[in-house]
């Protein structure tokens, strides 16, 4: 009984780590740039397809495909931000929602045309398969790998946002664009790089999540609500908030599907409602 509980807890943490990795990019664009980007899952899907194509067609090792997926997704995000997104920064939320949903459907249609509607196969390296013994319990190697990746990225993001000159420019540009521009900060370039960073993180999460979440053209639609829940519950514009929310929601989602499979899919929504009632601004709200 205890072994099952610990196994469910571990799988929930791994699942939550993956949700965080993808959702933190959305937290950056929504919280720091005040843009409701419902197309964020499309950037995650781009990263997933980059990994699949590199592995299956070119034989590129899995670990090497991950930074490439990050860079390609970041580049796509940078181009779209410069050509489309920046035109809607001053628009109301409804215009942003309609634009990003329309972009999502376009990406879904394009992916279906190129790769077809079926799930994409992924072949992980042998050293990421199977289980290892951790404190006397058998845990999946790949899920342990996911948790380790998220720890590293969380620490790196925290340092980037809080301890670097670029992070200070992001915070200043968000709080007061005119004052930041008057101090010599190129606000447009800061926003473009910030959007590219969020898109790249989504693409990295999409590549890492192929084996857990699967990959098909409907990916952005299937998981859009999950990403929004993580950001809404955790608090947009923060790093720790979405991390805590993703881990909490991941554990409850896996536990609900394991212990009460009849209603397991609704556990995460019930928890979301409860947490938003208790913390309407998110678990951790961004300080101005």
Image (cartoon, rainbow, N blue to C red):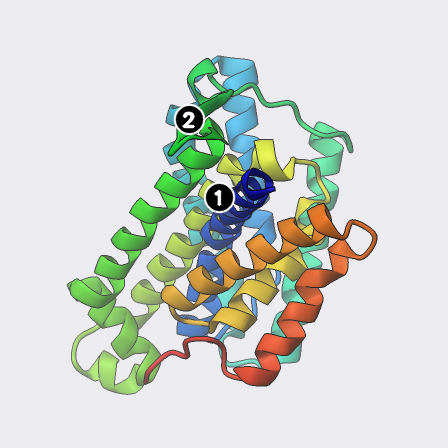
Picture mark count? 2
Q: Is residue 39 visible?
A: no
Residue at (57% x, 45% y) in the render: 5
Residue at the extreme front: 1
Closer to viewer: mark 2 or mark 1: 2
Which residue is under mark 2? 133
Image x and y of residue 1, in percent: 61, 42
Residue at (76% x, 29% y) in the render: 118
Q: Is residue 155 visible?
A: yes
Q: Nearer the viewer, residue 251 or 171?
A: 251
Q: Nearer the viewer, residue 169 or 61?
A: 61
Above or below for 200 versus 62 = below
Q: CA distance from mark 2 to mark 1?
A: 26 Å
Residue at (21% x, 63% y) in the render: 166
Image x and y of residue 185, in percent: 21, 73
Q: Quadrant of residue 100?
A: bottom right
Say few, some or many: other residues with alpha carbon within 10 Å of mark 2 (under 14 / 14 to 19 / 20 or more): few
Q: Nearer the viewer, residue 166 or 20?
A: 20
């Amino acid at each position: 009984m205890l072994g099952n509980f610990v196994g469910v807890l571990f799988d929930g943490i791994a699942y939550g780590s993956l949700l965080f990795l993808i959702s933190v990019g959305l937290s950056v664009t929504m919280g720091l740039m005040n843009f409701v980007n419902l197309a964020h899952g499309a950037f995650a899907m781009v990263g997933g397809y980059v990994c699949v194509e590199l592995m299956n067609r070119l034989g590129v090792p899995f670990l090497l495909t991950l930074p490439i997926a990050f860079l390609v997704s970041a580049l796509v995000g940078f181009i779209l931000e410069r050509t489309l997104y920046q035109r809607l920064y001053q628009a109301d939320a409804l215009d942003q929602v309609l634009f990003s949903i329309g972009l999502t459907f376009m990406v879904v249609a394009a992916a279906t045309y190129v790769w077809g509607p079926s799930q994409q196969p992924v072949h992980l390296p042998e050293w990421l398969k199977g289980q290892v013994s951790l404190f006397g319990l058998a845990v999946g190697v790949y899920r342990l790998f996911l948790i380790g990746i998220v720890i590293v990225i969380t620490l790196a993001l925290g340092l980037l946002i809080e301890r670097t000159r670029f992070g200070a420019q992001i915070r200043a540009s968000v709080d007061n664009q005119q004052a930041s521009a008057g101090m010599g900060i190129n606000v447009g370039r800061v926003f473009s790089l910030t959007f590219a960073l969020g898109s790249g993180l989504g693409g990295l999460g999409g590549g890492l999540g192929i084996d857990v979440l699967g990959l098909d053209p409907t990916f952005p639609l299937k998981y859009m609500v999950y990403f929004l829940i993580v950001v809404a519950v955790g608090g947009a514009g923060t790093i720790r908030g979405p991390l805590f929310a993703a881990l909490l929601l991941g554990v409850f989602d896996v536990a609900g599907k394991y212990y009460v499979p009849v209603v397991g899919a609704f556990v995460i929504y019930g928890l979301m409602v409860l947490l938003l009632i208790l913390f309407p601004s998110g678990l951790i709200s961004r300080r101005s």
